[in-house]
Image (cartoon, rainbow, N blue to C red):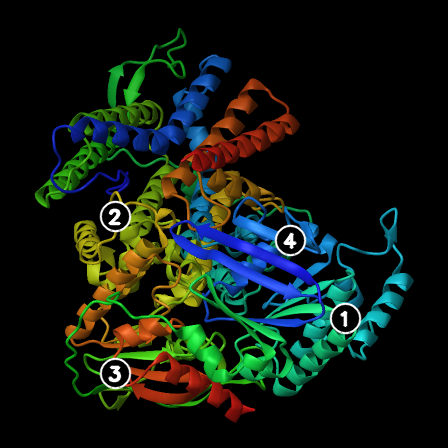
Amino acid sequence: MSTESAPAPQGNVTDEQRPRIAVSALTTNLREYGLIIALIVIMLFFQFTTSGTLFKPVNLSNLVQQNSFIIVMALGMLLVIVSGYIDLSVGSVAGFIGALAANMMVIWQLGPLSNPLVVSIVCLVVGGLIGAAQGYWIAYHRIPSFIVTLAGMLIFRGICQALLGGGSSVGPLPDDFKMLSSGFIPDVIGPLTLIPPTVNAAGKTIMGSGLTLHMTTIVLGLIAVVAYAYFGLRTRRKRERHGYEAEPFPLFVIKTLVASALALFLVYEFASYRGLPVVLLVMGVLISLFVFVTKRMTIGRRIYAMGGNPKAAQLSGINTERLTLLVFINMGVLSALGGLIIAARLGQAVPAAGLGSELDVIAAVFIGGASAMGGVGQVIGAVVGGFIMGVMNNGMSIMGVNVDWQQVVKGLVLLGAVIFDVYNKNKA
Amino acid sequence: MTTILEMRDITKTFPGVKALSNVNLSVEEGEIHAVVGENGAGKSTLMKVLSGVYPSGTYDGQIIFQGQECQFKGIQDSEHKGIVIIHQELALVPMLSIAENIFLGNEHARYGVIDWNANEARTAALLKKVGLKEDPKTLITNIGVGKQQLVEIAKALSKEVKLLILDEPTASLSEKDSQALLDLLLEFKRQGMTSILISHKLNEINRVADKVTVIRDGRTIETLAKKDISEDRIITSMVGRSLDDRYPPREPHIGEVVFEVKNWSVYHPIHAERQVIKGININVRKGEVVGIAGLMGAGRTEFAMSLFGRSYGRRITGEVLLKGKPVDVSSVSKAVQHGIAYVTEDRKTYGLNLIDHIKHNITLANLGGVSRHSVIDDMRELAVANDYRKKTNIRASSVYQLTGNLSGGNQQKVVLSKWLFADPEVLILDEPTRGIDVGAKYEIYTIIARLASEGKAIVVISSEMPELLGITDRIYVMNEGRIVGEMPAADASQEKIMRAIVRGEGKAA
């Protein structure tokens, strides 16, 4: 996950020190993986209460497709919150972009400009411009982000509804476009049938019977797992070559094995249904990119420094205004992508698209351990936070919990997660 | 005359620092008693002990007020007895009216409903006493600093004050406002009120004080009666301390001029008409340590910050030359690129990201030095951090320790490391040893000496004159936004510096 998350002591380590280091590495890791463990516990809980429905391949695909837009937007929101700001407009911007995309593809008849790919690119650019417009006031005129984006929330919801001509919806959207949300990657290798489906008396196959694996998904999954292990090992080697103690080898092996097993399990689940959802692939690429940017790139480091102490960052030569602007442009682009994903999943643009989702996104980031004061928060945390919200939505819906009470539970989980975090920090 | 206040053997210790040791202060009823001393001598700490800001039990010694021993648990207790302190930084709420401020927390009210007529009538009467002709409904933000100071005094009067303490009341006032304030103090004295005046403006003390108590290094040095008060006597008493080997030895190798500032002028960021820096010229040579002396509020930090990427002030004019060539220092990143570094006075607010660890703080000003194509090389960063940790002797369990958990001295070493890694030609250090213990101070001096011997040009801003005398080669004296003196450190003495400041003050008026 991170090449530097486990702060191992440096220098020559004596044998007496070794057990102590192992313990400290373990506790640090436990804190870091506490959230992932919480997610797994929640999933197992719903697996039990939904009599095994949660982990059914078809449901896992649904879960990903329903919640991917939250996680995509949470990536941008993480940077916004780490920088010390907030963005309330993301739900409205997503709704507006969905309406814009639908109009471009269905109503306005723009010829080649109505091509779903062209429309998507235009929409992402528009999202970036919206982010820049809001970020400009926040960065260069020091208007509180809460106010600027509250205004944005009203403005873009209004434009969204106006574009859709009041309360009506625009659709249906082209099938190519819907691929973004409801599509699966093509099986270029070809399916592997392990158990042939049962044929009924009429000579038709029974749905869901038999076992056919989507081989491209399996292969991609294996590549990912091997790459994960390889890079983990390489980082260890590098540390050791430079004379620094890496985390204890057994711990590393256990960590890698558990993560690989979990990943392969999910890959198998997807492969036994229709393969890897396109949107999961998009999400995976984005998550990796953001982990890399926040952990390894100078711009990521600068964002954390700015959130931790803006004045000190400025006096260290960081252009905090421009950095703030970039953070909001990024948020705008990801809100637009979120909007496209929502529209693609519904197959149409509706006035309520993304309504209230800013709160889910913000909640995901805070559940993931980010600090409202800025300077603290991890990409993986926000992603897991997003999945926790998603699993709770999905699980409670299957259980038939009333939507009203779902809100209550989500609120309590958010509060509990943050209290737990604050308590832990004070203890440390 | 009877003694209204007696403070006996007051000793107050902060972690690692003894701020006051066995201080005695005795104030007669109806007099104006001045307390003088250098910055950091312990004047304000003493007043905080007296007013209960540091509650009883956190210090040793006795406070006897009007014949009774007092153990104040907080400001409310001391105010209840009639001891009111007016702090250096005004404590008024800008967007509330004069009347609201005066009775803040003390409103004439019944069942929580404020009787505005009573408040305003009382306010009007109090304002008359201090000679202020403003409507009680005027917002604080709309009146000048001088009048705000008078409102503070009116607020004190509203509390049935028996002993009024003023902590450098004229520090931010114009000459005219200062005179008015001093006249008011004399008027109060005629009415029988006792006041303690903390100040280092000797002309003011000469004018109003009946007695002067000098504090130095947290000890009472002497108390002078009116007839013994003289500038020379006070100055000697304020600074008379021996310079032992608290400073590392150093062989200066001074080269050509590296850094030059010409005609630097800066205006206040909010009060646009107030000129804070008034045409300053300085230069620093290769391998030279130059000090800037002055009292608090002389404009030294403002000068340094305005030089460093215009981080302070507006309408900045003047020229900065590096090795004879004018350079653009209009943003911090440009200044850093040209090899100028500024180690801030307040390391917690301006210097460090306290919620991040040592390693990240050290590389922050020069991320390019540990990255390729904007991708940070972890191993290189770790090596750099460990290297500087060793070089500056940062005491921490590892470079992954949060800077917020370090002691002041170690925090300062992290800030220094950050700027050393940026590899500057010119290093400006603003109060580099404030609030850190003697051992850490020596280490910082050693680092400064080593940097100078490596050929860096160094500027040290400090309010501690012995420190400047001990570590610099040349000293500029600054007062009220001007350079009022320049002397080789070898010829300088605390008396000379103090004299330059005091004379400069006279000139400015």
Give neighbour class at mark 1: few <14, some 14-19, many 20+ (Cα, 10 Å).
few
Q: Which mark is residue B399?
A: 2
Do the residues at pointers 4 and 3 share their chain? yes
Q: Which residue is mark 3?
A: B490
**Chain to which mark 1 belongs:** B
Q: Which residue is mark 4?
A: B64
> Is label 2 in a helix, a strand or a loop?
loop
C-alpha separation, residue under disc 4 versus residue under disc 2 = 50 Å
Give neighbour class at mark 4: few <14, some 14-19, many 20+ (Cα, 10 Å).
some
> Is label 4 in a helix, a strand or a loop?
strand
What's the amino acid at mark 1?
Gly
Do the residues at pointers 1 and 2 share their chain? yes
Task: Tell me where residue B96 appears, x and y as whole percent.
Answer: 74, 65
Residue mark closest to the camera, 1 vs 3: 1
Q: Which mark is residue B192?
A: 1
**Chain to which mark 2 belongs:** B
> Is label 1 in a helix, a strand or a loop?
loop
Residue at the spot x=52%, y=48% of the render?
B59
* Disc nearer the start of the sequence (1/4): 4
Residue at the spot x=64%, y=80% of the render?
B208
User: In this picture, is A205 found above or below A70?
Assistant: above
Task: Tell me where residue B145 appears, x and y as whole percent.
Answer: 65, 77
What's the amino acid at mark 4?
Ile
If the image is split into quadrants, where does the C terminus of chain A sit? top left
